Structure formats: C-alpha cells, structure tokens
Amino acid sequence: MKILTDIQSIGSLQGPLHLAIGVFDGVHKGHQTVIRRALDCQKTSGGEVVVVTFDPHPVTVLAPESAPRLLTSTHHKAILIAELLDVRHLLVVRFDRKFAAQTGDVFIRQLCEAAEIGSISVGSDFQFGKGRSGNVALLDSLSSELNFQLNATEIVEIDGVVASSTEIREAIEKGDFASARKLLGREYTVLGTVIEGRQLGRTIGFPTANLTVHSEQLPPVGVYAVRASLNGVIHAGVANLGYRPTVEGADARLLLEVHLFDWEKDIYGEDLEIEFVRFIRGEQKFDGVEALKVQIQADAEEARTFLGV
C-alpha cells in the first residue's frame, strides 16, 4: 500500500478517484462496508480507490481528556485495509487544531481541486469540520456542484449490535473476543514493535519479545495462547500481558511479552501483530523465579496443545 500524507499528492493518481472517508478505527464491518462501496464504484467506472483517514484520532486533539485507546494505530490500519480489502492507496490527513478549524466544505473542495473525484463514500453518521458542519447533507449538496457520486452507507448491525469502535473496545476490555470478532469480521489483533527488555526470559529458557503497543486497546491482564504475525508469517506462542509482580516489585509497569515457540532469532525493531487466541490464566505473583519458570513451562504446554503445535 502507498501512504500519501498530502492532499495535493492524490493529483498524481489516475482518475477518477473513489474516496472512502472516515477515521476507520478498527476497520470493522461497518468500515469495510464503506470502503467496499468505493471499490464497487471503481469496478463500474475505473480509476483508483483512495481511503482517506486522519492522524492522530480527532478525539485526541479535540477532547484529549476523554480520548479512548485505539483499536488500530494508523500503521496497523493501513496493514488491515490492504490485507482485507486490497486497497492500494491511503491518504493520511494530519488532524490538528488548524485543520479542525476548517469548515466541512473547505476539506471537500480541497480534495476535488486536487484530483478528479468520481465518488465519495462515507458512513451515514459521518461528521467532520468545524462545529461538525460537514455531514451527509453537506456532501449531498456538494455532489451536484462538484460532480461526484455520494454513497452514504447505513449503520451496520450484527445480531442487533451496532458495529462500532466503542462496542468493540468494550468487548476487548472484558476479554470477549467472540463478540469483537463478530463486529470486526476478523480476529482482533494488536500491533507492537519489539523493544529490548531485561532479558530475564532468556536466562530461564523462555526468551520473550517485549512489545511496545501502539496505543491500542488491550484485553485483561493475564497469560494467553497467541498467534503472532511477523513479516506476513504466522508463529504460535504464549504471551504474558501484565506487570510481572514476581520480578518487578514496586517498579512494575504494564508489559506485553511474547514467547514464540521454536524461535531463537533477535527481532528488535520488528513489528509483531498479535492475536490473543485463548486466555490461559490470570496474572499471579510467585515465591521466586524457579516457581515462575515451572508455571511458564505449564503455560507454554497448554498453549502448544490448544494451538496444535
């Protein structure tokens, strides 16, 4: 996928362009429906599909005190949109106070001045611009003037539950991966970068990749059987999400550590996409490192059995 960071850069693409515009946090079934409308327009009239999103999440700028954890960072979002929908272009618009002060019609006119826009697809509840002046009604009025097709996609419900980032976030907070899966249309994953840790796991026979997660929503603390995607290859493993009370003491902070089965290479700086497959147990404090080692061995065996490794 090609990442564009300037509105003017879409002018270099072969038109007409079919834009799917939204925050798309989580790339859930509702988001996928919006993007597929743009893909349908491309099939009919040619050109290119461009997904247009915003970074950082608008809430972090407009109301940082109430900003939730993300379901997907911008980098993770790009990976998912490319994998799930085979979209080749993502325009990431910088969202700051200056951009937020623009009225909705200014943003749409900027897009239409930069390139030939064949269609714009949004969710029916999408709002943008100063004072939320941009909405479907505005887009409808501009579509005739600026000569683009408007696709306003209705809210998607699964078994009576609205597919929304908020619903999915609440499910993940409770460890309800089944409900999250229904709304996402995929397994829930988090993306993290491997950083150097204290290497305690290596000394007790269980080397771990310590991940800094990109502000993404995490499930309850505990030990999980996981699948980890590294450069497109899936590896089975066991993960501990928690504060490591046995070894950290008063210095404890939340960490995600992943032990990949039958893997010995250093992967510092690499991105791992982690799927929490099965909850094994809650976090607990042991009498010492030897007792911890015995429990990790048992956790690893349970994870191997469940994952069929």
Image (spheres, rainbow, N blue to C red):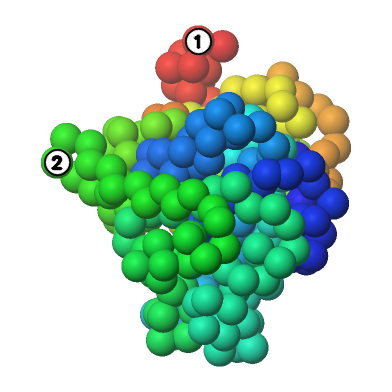
What's the residue at 71%, 23% (across, down)?
233
User: Label 2 amino acid?
Assistant: Gly
Q: In this rendering, is residue 279 above or below 166?
A: above
Give the residue at the far left of this rendering: 160
Q: Is residue 271 left or right of residue 172?
A: right
For the residue labelled by badge 2, is the local secondary structure a helix, a strand or a loop? Answer: loop
Q: Where is residue 273 in the image (x, y as percent from the top left)?
A: 62, 39
Position of the C terminus, as image quadrant, is: top right
Q: Is residue 158 visible?
A: yes
Q: In this rendering, is residue 166 above or below 163?
A: below
What's the residue at 23%, 37% (across, down)?
158
- Residue identifier under label 2: 160
Mark 1 or mark 2, earlier in chain: 2
Q: Where is residue 279 in the image (x, y as percent from the top left)?
A: 38, 35
User: Label 1 amino acid?
Assistant: Gly
What's the residue at 81%, 27% (across, down)?
264
Mark toward the viewer: 1 or 2? 2
Q: Which of 174 and 111 is in front in this view?
A: 111
For the residue labelled by badge 1, is the local secondary structure a helix, a strand or a loop? Answer: loop
Q: In this rendering, is residue 299 above or below 119?
A: above
What's the residue at 50%, 77% (across, down)?
104
Q: Is residue 56 left or right of residue 171?
A: right
Q: Tag on residue 308?
A: 1
Q: Which of 87 and 168 is in front in this view?
A: 87
